[in-house]
Image: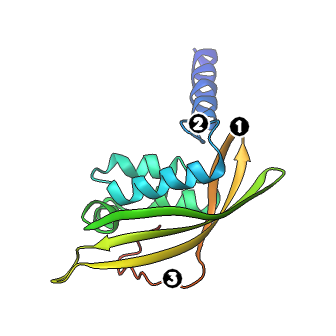
Amino acid sequence: MKTKIVVLTLVLFLGSSCNRFSVTHKGKAPDEVVKSFVELSATSKDLSDRRRLADFCAGELRRAFERMTDEAFKLSYTTSQLNIKEFSVVSSAIVERQATVRYRVVVENGTGTDPTLEINEREVELTENRGAWFLENIRPYGSDQIAFTHGMIF
């Protein structure tokens, strides 16, 4: 009986460890991974999207999604009135298993009484793990104009 419990525990542990990083975006270039993350951020409509967003991330960025409450995710992602009008990669560089992608996104913000177009510029650091790129850090870059009151990332 103890052997079965140990084996079951080991299988569950190894299974969860292997699933730590989703590889749904395996084989994509860093700029394609960033674009997919940004598009999902803007179109999230369900709590299950939090897990999908986390699957694009590693390190502290991943932990931020894992620790986020359902209410915080709904407020920041599923109730937004943002529409991506344009996405462009400004630059992309890969050095061994690290990549940096700078991008610009033009967003129509429907919050409030008068919709506005806003330009958002970011620099993303990614790391490669098992043939897939994962976002580790996102920071403002350039003339970032967008301000999210609820912490929206992109």
Q: Secondary structure at mark 2?
A: loop
Q: Secondary structure at mark 1?
A: loop
Number of disc labels: 3
Q: Which mark is residue 57?
A: none
The answer to whether residue 16 is above or below residue 106 is: above
Q: Secondary structure at mark 3?
A: loop
Q: Nearer the viewer, residue 41 or 63?
A: 41
The answer to whether residue 7 is above or below residue 87 is: above
Q: Quadrant of residue 108?
A: bottom left
Q: Amino acid at mark 2?
A: Val
Q: Residue 124, position in %: x, y?
A: 63, 65
Q: Quadrant of residue 42?
A: bottom left
Q: Residue 150, position in %: x, y?
A: 35, 76
Q: Residue 125, position in %: x, y?
A: 68, 63
The answer to whether residue 55 is above or below residue 143 is: above
Q: Which mark is residue 131?
A: 1
The CA span between labels 1 and 2 is: 8 Å
Extreme residue toward the left, this view: 113
Which residue was labeled with disc 3? Answer: 144
Which residue was labeled with disc 2? Answer: 23
Q: Is residue 38 left or right of residue 28?
A: left
Q: Nearer the viewer, residue 29 or 13?
A: 29
Q: Is residue 68 left or right of residue 91?
A: left
